[in-house]
Amino acid sequence: MKKLIFTLFFAGSIATASQAQIQQGNVMVGTNLSNINFALDKPNAFSLAINPKAAWFIDDGVAIGGDVMFGLETPGKDLGTTINYGIGALGRYYGQTGANELIKSSRFFGEATVGVSGRNLSGGGSTNGLGFSVGPGFTYFITRTIGLEALLKYQGVVGFGSSAYAHNLNLGVGFQIYLPGRSTARKVGRDID
């Protein structure tokens, strides 16, 4: 009986935590990694993109903020390097919880960004200009303040250079930390008293 009560209490606290972290006034900070490839058969061949971001919840489940992206691709010896970069505004919208306990401690979301981006190849070719991305994601709250997420994004750059348009589809994984705002901290403090 004690195990059942503990399990129900634990599941309820996780479900409550996933709702509390995306409330108005809270802050989200973290990073995603994508395009991860370390080729063992080719010396010096790898690719990796890192995407730190921060956002503030302006309403329950709605966050705005900024993000930075830096990616590096080296296909191998003497083949050149590709550098991807970007900085811009970020928007996120979190959907409702699901039907079972696993889904209640997680959220689906949509993310969109717009800003300045570029893709530059060392052997020539480049596209620099207006960057944008959009895609769905899924966050699983492993603790009250940390979310493990997966994000599938279509990314594009429209501008100038040797090519007027460049695009790709990325699957990224990462961690986000959800920090309570002042109003949330005050509410939690009143609930404890």
Image: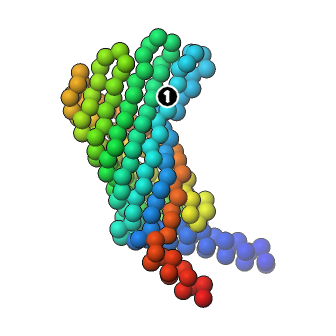
Q: In the picture shown, does residue 148 fall above or below 166? A: below
Scheme by which the image is coloured? rainbow
Q: How far across and how far down the image is residue 57, in percent? A: 39, 66
Q: In the picture shown, does residue 97 fall above or below 161? A: below
Q: Is residue 107 left or right of residue 11?
A: left
Q: Quadrant of residue 11?
A: bottom right
Q: Is residue 100 visible?
A: no
Residue most toward the bottom? 193
Q: Is residue 165 left or right of residue 188?
A: left
Residue most toward the top? 78
Q: In the picture shown, does residue 192 fall above or below 81? A: below
Q: Quadrant of residue 125?
A: top left
Q: In the picture shown, does residue 21 fall above or below 46? A: below
Which residue is depicted at the point 36% across and 56% down? 65
Q: How far across and how far down the image is residue 116, in percent? A: 28, 40
Disc 1 on helix, strand or loop? strand
Q: Which residue is mark 1?
A: 47
Q: Is residue 103 left or right of residue 167?
A: right
Q: How far across and how far down the image is residue 10, in percent? A: 67, 71
* Depth check, front residue: 70 or 13: 70
Q: Is residue 180 visible?
A: yes
Quarter of the image that includes the N terminus: bottom right
* Depth check, front residue: 148 or 178: 178
Which residue is depicted at the point 57% across and 22% down? 39
Q: How far across and how far down the image is residue 126, in percent? A: 29, 24
Q: Amino acid at mark 1?
A: Ser
> Within 10 Å of the Cα at label 1, are there few (<14), some (14-19), or many (20+) other Cα atoms?
some
Quarter of the image that includes the C terminus: bottom right
